[in-house]
Image (cartoon, rainbow, N blue to C red):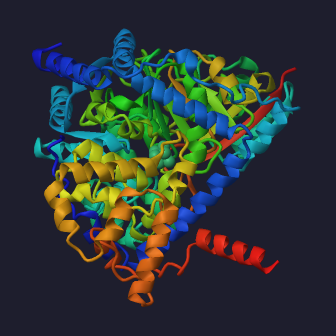
Amino acid sequence: MNRASRDGRRAVLDSVRAALAGGERTSAESIPREYRRQRPVESPAELFRERVADYRAEVRAADSAGAPEAVLRALEHAAAGRVVLPEGLPATWAEPLAERYETFDDRPPLPTATLEGVDAVVTTCTVAIASTGTIVLDHGPGQGRRALTLLPDTHVCLVPASRIVDDVPAALAALDPGRPMTFVSGPSATSDIELERVEGVHGPRDLHVVVVDDA
Amino acid sequence: MSGVDLGMPSFPDAARQAVRDAQLRHNLGNATNTIRNKRAAVVGELDDWEQLRASGAAIKAHTLSNLDSYLEQFESAVTAAGGTVHWARDAAEANRIVTELVRETGETEAVKVKSMATQEIGLNEALASAGISAWETDLAELIVQLDEDRPSHILVPAIHRNRSEIREIFRREMAGSGTPAPADLTDDPVQLAEAARHHLRDKFLRARVAISGANFAVAETGGLVVVESEGNGRMCLTMPEHLISVVGIEKVVPSWRDLEVFLQLLPRSSTGERMNPYTSVLSGVTAGDGPSDFHVVLLDNGRSEALADEIGSQALRCIRCSACLNVCPVYERTGGHAYGSVYPGPIGAVLTPQLYGVESEDTASLPYASTLCGACYDVCPVAIEIPELLVHLRNRTVRERKGWFDRLTRTAMRAMGWVFGDSGRLARAQRVASLGGRLFGRRGIGRLPWPLSRWTDARDAPTPPAESFRQWWERTRTNDEDGR
Ligand code: SF4
């Protein structure tokens, strides 16, 4: 740390301490937490499907055997031709795709220019939130680095029903805070022009969600 | 004091212009009304909203009361995760640090995520004078930047523009800073968004430096949280090699778990959605994914001074959801520009004078830009008592700017000025206002006491009823009882 930034650090902290001097410092234990940490619902998968559809995502439900077919139908719907597959996507999902589409593996990492020319990406997720219709990627196996779900126009996400939790608190508890994360609720959208909602400003235009009954 | 020249007209002058602008009033009325209704619907879905709100307020208050130690904890966590923390006392220092960091990369351009902190310090202008182009990438911010305009709302900064104006701006200005707008561009929002996508995609993929703010900074993990809709935030946080985040020191929350409260409060209060399209969390650097070089600039710029004010420090809890703007009757009529600050609306009226001081008339007049109706407090997800703060700051203005206030009280309506300035009680204010209406006996009040007069000069303040609701209630109920 150079001299100037050391000075800045001391000055800001001194000034904060001076402001707090004599005031009461509360303890974290005194924070009331009477809100619901759980929001039990009969079928989280059903609520999730409903809520994610509210964001104009395309939703499909499938059992394990039918999941590859559902992904194919999602890609057809999006008229995708070139598909990138993240490292660690289960072979049962990846292989049927490779037969029908021009697929790209991200190992070694694809150059940005190649990724730009890809139409779709197929991933799974770490956890999904029923009450808000959100999928969360921590970019681990089967989810790819962040750019993979950002540059292609279509994102197909396989959501195992067992990973759907009722609400935000349960989702955060299931995540590793040290990892990079992306919470996704529908396709990218803007309402900046006269409040009219338009999908696909900078991120994916289409979000397809396949809820896989893996019980 | 920040030393930044706001360079904007004071509230009363700007408000006078704004209320004459029919387009602005129409757009604003629509926007605030729509967002208000959406918000009410999704808030209504949660039967524990008040408990979430109480918790959100308490977490923020607790953090502020231990801010020094949480800042230090945040710094260590970021450092451990491979990032570097810098501390900036004021705007000039923050701008210097960011400029240096960009220079070290050898680059002369950077992409930017919408950030109020960087607007507050005038970062774009500072970078420009150092020969660095900073491109705004949020669609609304892009519109504002291309037209060399100013944002007018926290959430929808270009709400004062309509689609045909936006088309003109794109056609006229895009070519000057990159990919031009297509020649056959219409004013269809889908096409306009598409033009912005093309214009910016090129910048995202080319830029090696990104500048962002953050909605939350988690002390425990060193994580920064960026909440957005368009994906431009994700682009900036993911594609360039160098990331510089300018974060106000009040953005710290203690633990990862605290986000379970704020990720419920913020989207519902802000855009009226159960969740916003994208939220990114990043802690330091991750090999093979995202930036390899990460800097956080912790910004004071008047915040520690505001912290010293027992009542005023509440404003530092603000999570910039903009719900208070959307319910404020004054904001709805004047728009954000009138506040002459990057923080408009009720929160701007209490935050700006604290960050910038009340030495200038620009900031000193802000606490008067309110009817003290209390709607802002009702919607605030962290329960900031904005009306109480307004009154508190009015008193401070009177104390610190004695000469200024003496001039103001020379007006004939001095008595009313004191009531508006000091009482903070709507009932009392209403009673006095109705007296004013009767005194002048016209369609409108015409003139409220200075400095409110400078606001009412520009509008027909409806004559308050000859009696307030409360007076009417008391009278009719009494009559009723008499009649029995
Ligand atoms: S003061 Fe409250 S309502 Fe207004 S922007 Fe801040 S958090 Fe939102």
Q: Quadrant of residue A10?
A: top left
Q: Quadrant of the N terminus of chain B?
A: top left
Taking B51 as reference, is A192 above or below it?
below
Identity of the residue drawn at 27% across and 48% down: B396
In the image, taking residue B222 as reference, residue A176 lies left or right, namely right
Q: Quadrant of residue B330?
A: bottom left
Q: How many marks overall?
A: 0
Identity of the residue drawn at 18% across and 29% down: B97
In-front residue for pair B479/A81 = B479
In the image, taking residue B476 as reference, residue A47 lies left or right, namely right
Residue B366 position in % (x across, y down): 31, 57
Taking B320 as reference, is B442 above or below it?
below
Q: Residue furthest top?
A: B80
Residue B18 position in % (x across, y down): 34, 73
Q: Residue furthest bottom?
A: B442
Residue B258 position in % (x across, y down): 56, 24
Taking A4 as reference, is B280 above or below it?
below
Q: Quadrant of the C terminus of chain B?
A: bottom right
Residue B219 in sight from this viewpoint:
yes
Residue B74 position in % (x across, y down): 38, 17
In-front residue for pair B415/B244 = B415
Identity of the residue drawn at 75% across and 77% down: B482
Residue B191 in sight from this viewpoint:
no
Q: Quadrant of residue B82?
A: top left
In the image, taking residue A142 as reference, residue B217 lies left or right, namely left
In-front residue for pair B225/B278 = B225
